[in-house]
Amino acid sequence: MGDTGASETGMPRRLSSRLSSLAASPMKIIDSLLGPAGADVIRLHAGEPSLPPPLELVDSLVDDLRRPESYAYAPTRGLPELREAVAEELKRDGTSVSFDEVAITPSGTSAIFSAMSVLLDPGDEVILVDPTFMIYRPVIEYLGGRVRWVRASPERGFQPDPDAVAAAINDRTKAIVLVDPDNPTGRLLDPDIGRAIAELAQDRGVYLMVDEAYRRIVYEGSYRSVQPYAPDSVIGLGTFSKDPGVPGLRLGYIYGPKDFIDAYASFNGHAFFGASNMSQLYVLRYLRWEGREKFIESVVAEYRRRRDAAVKAMRRYVPSARFTEPRASMYLYADLSPLVNDAESFASRLASKYRVTVMPGTAFGPANRTFIRVTFVSQPPERLEEGIRRIGEALGEAGQ
């Protein structure tokens, strides 16, 4: 990093050189092109839910604001009753963890940073599936780690190859990361592949981090945890930003072997201290709410309707696009080659000229220069269709 100015003594002030690993994200670049939000901007780039949380629980949040404990420091590991509720909730997917193997985190992304901080020494390697959620690579490199990519090809439905994962493990490997259900591809992990990779991690003495942010956003099939196959190796990461859809409350969770959770708590005590009590009280109410399952069913039904609208519009307006219909999460991941060979440039032009925002595939891994990610939950179907129509219009111009 260069000089940032001079101090009163005349000596140059310098920021950490590690910041170079946090280059401007594609999302930040797109936002800078748009300026203030406008009515004609169709935002299909951010993974943000668009349906409100249950209104009766919103009313309870107002009541919680009057409780003195809402303003107190929270325990470093989170409220005990919420940790119990999370452990109970995880049983539905086959995850078996006790109260002391769960901690509450101040957001899902902070769980990623904290977990990597606990695991990595400089020079350690982490295996990432290409493509994968864009936060992992910068965090690993910021902490002095190295990324080893393993391609999950579209021809395999973006399912990772256990043999390729095995071949990537060496004596510097600390962890393997799987996002399931996947961001950006919408892939639901094949159970046999998940089991093979979990058992591989256990046999080779590396951690398997499973990012399960979208575990309740499934349209076909069902999510099943790999934790029972490697309970001493699996670290699970989750968020309450998608279910119940409250990203602004900044709350997540992490689970794993007790020695790992103890180490996480030690780190968290110095880094973040604890998550918001108010947010924890809201999520605790939600997990205990008798109407929760009907609420999730209604949300998934609406998101499925929007998924279907996006697939139909893509086939109509962008017939050359190659994609796999997403079975889960919130995204359609499309290959636009040969009309697009630089997704970042295309996304920038799409935002500035056609007022539609998408995420370029380069955010998710090195083999994705011709891909874009379209978020289909953020807009109603008619708005979604218009956004994809504009993508087709921009591609028509690119192909001329």
Image (cartoon, rainbow, N blue to C red):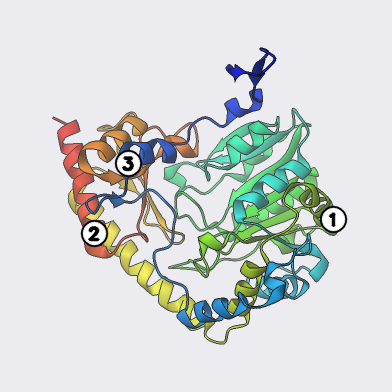
Q: Residue under circle 3?
A: 35
Q: Nearer the viewer, mark 3 or mark 1?
A: 3
Q: What residue type is labelled 1?
A: Asp
Q: What residue type is labelled 2?
A: Arg
Question: Marks 3 and 1, how far apart in space?
Answer: 44 Å
Q: Give the residue at x 48% y 39%.
A: 364
Q: Give the residue at x 63% y 69%.
A: 278
Q: Which of marks 2 and 3 is in front?
A: 3
Q: Earlier in the sequence, mark 1 or mark 2?
A: 1
Disc 3 to disc 1: CB gap under 8 Å: no
Question: Marks 1 and 2, how far apart in space?
Answer: 47 Å
Question: Marks 2 and 3, how far apart in space?
Answer: 20 Å
Disc 2 to disc 3: CB gap under 8 Å: no
Secondary structure category for the residue under label 3: loop
Residue 179: % across, % down: 57, 52
Q: Which of marks 3 and 1 is nearer the N terminus?
A: 3
Q: Residues within 10 Å of mark 2 (few under 14, many from 20)?
A: some
Q: Residue under circle 1?
A: 262
Q: How crowded is mark 1: few (under 14 residues within 10 Å), some or many (20 or more)?
A: some
Q: Give the residue at x 42% y 44%.
A: 155
Q: Residue under circle 2?
A: 383
Q: Quadrant of the N terminus?
A: top right
